[in-house]
Amino acid sequence: MKSVLSIIGSLFLLMPFTTSAQEVDATIMQKIREEGLQKSKVMEIAFNLTDKNGNRLTNSEGYARAANYAKETLAGWGLQNARVEPWGEFGKGWDLQKMYLAMTAPYYKPLLAWPKTWTEGTKGLKKGGLIVVDAKDSATVMGYAGQLKGKLIIIDQTNAYKQSFKADAIRFTEEDLAKMAAATMPAGARGGQAMDTAQQRRMREAMARNGNMRAMTILKNLAKEEGAIGMVTSGVRNHDGTIFSQGGGAYKAADAANFLDMALGIEDYNMLLRLVKSGTEVSMEADVKTKFQEKDMQGYNVIAEIPGTDPVLKDEVVMIGAHLDSWQAGNGATDNAAGSSVMMEVMRIIKTIGVQPKRTIRIGLWSGEEQGLLGSRGYVKNTFLDANGKPNEAHQKFAGYFNIDNGTGKVRGIYLQGNDACKPIFTKWLAPFNDLGATTVTISNTGGTDHLAFDAIGLPGFQFIQDPIEYDTRTHHSNMDVYEHLSEDDLKQIATVVAAFAYNTAQADAKLPRKEK
């Protein structure tokens, strides 16, 4: 009895499959499916990027380990020009070397906490009382002057715990996908009005945040000046053992180490706050050691490629990419070892099945994404723009870029990023994988990740639609962003679909169309 994969492959061999003067090679699609779904190495790659190398904060020791592993692995598969390539100045690296926090009175209780990045340590074990600070505005904060020496600070804030009645992990429904597919470009007047309303709301929210940030900055400066031990903070998302912890301040070469700020779960945070506000004397001890990497301030990406073989088209480039860096609390499994592992697996699939792509297929694993798409923007600037910021020859010869950075969920389709001319092409390229759940092409944009660096300078850059799973609810920038939260079957499916898109772009008669200016 033939397998389902064999039957599907046979059907595509019998069906003519064209897109804008290009016929999709059903035999190659079948080879990609077999290699990607049945002989996958994606979880082995993910294990190396996560468990073996730890978190990958940009310029940290973990990032350097992971970048070197990626470079050496890609080179070992036979890719050319594998390198760890500087893109420009980033700033200091930071590593956590020790973390201990406990309440010692009115009784002993160890506490799970994660220091925020680029914060200093305690310089040994420190003991002191817990002080509640109201940080609603700058004037209120200054009222605590002279009271902070030897204290651990806790902010007076409400963190209401709410039970989780909904599942953390979800997949897009057919109705969700149908709405995406039916999306249209917003009408000029109507779109403008909506944007005005949204902008006003965002401005109000930003003003409120800025006021609070100013008060917190003043508090941290005062605490550092007076010799406080550190501070603990939390938020309503930090519950049930999941703690979201990101940046603790500036990281450029000239920036001083930031005051120690540790993220707690709201259960422990609220307990401490209730005790102190009840008049109970609370004693704490902390021992936190951090290390700053200051010898090399450059940021680095990992680059490698499969050279094109067509005499005319080999200098044209197709790119796939994902960001390799992560935050510190977990080991960046879904954000974004998932994407990096998938893209490495894509290159392995294409190399292993023995095809000879017409165009060069290049992988980019970016750093500094979490600080503002810095690695991909640096690469784009260095590669596709001249000294005057104008498109160069490489810009003209660029065929397209595909990105993965929305967690472990399988591909359900692709965002056109407003590039309607690609819709019929991508619809046909998805067809061989409709049975795997990849069906939807939407005109909509999606933001927040590295395809935007390419799109910003007029290059065709795309992010795939992925099932959310528990990305936003559980793993994104949290201590739960670890290997166990990766879905093996989903990652295999992603790599298979992306490999097909990369290969089809390399073989197409023309580069992907670009958006009208």
Image (cartoon, rainbow, N blue to C red):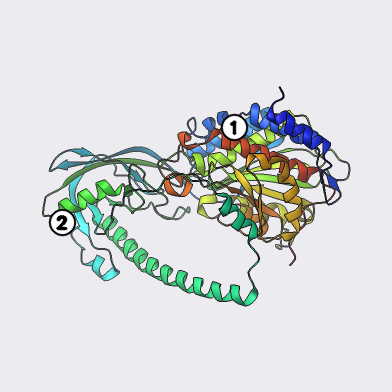
Q: Residue at x 45, y 52 (%)?
A: 251
Q: Position of residue 210 (x, y in %)?
A: 39, 67
Q: Residue at x 26, y 49 (%)?
A: 269
Q: Position of residue 104 (x, y in %)?
A: 17, 40
Q: Is residue 484 visible?
A: yes
Name the residue nearer the viewer: 241 or 384. Answer: 241
Question: Quadrant of the rendered structure where residue 351 is?
Answer: top right
Q: What type is the residue that disc 2 sits on?
A: Lys
Q: What type is the residue that disc 1 sits on?
A: Val
Query: Would residue 61 be found to the left or right of residue 175 on screen?
Result: left
Please tell me whether residue 37 is drawn above or below residue 410 in the rendered image: above
Secondary element at tag 1: helix
Q: Are marks 2 and 1 in contact (CB under 8 Å)?
A: no
Q: Could you tell me which quadrant the C terminus lies in?
A: bottom right
Please tell me whether residue 185 is drawn above or below residue 266 in the rendered image: below
Q: Residue at x 24, y 39 (%)?
A: 125
Q: Could you tell me which quadrant the N terminus lies in?
A: top right
Instruction: Find disc 1 in the rendering and name its residue.
Output: 42
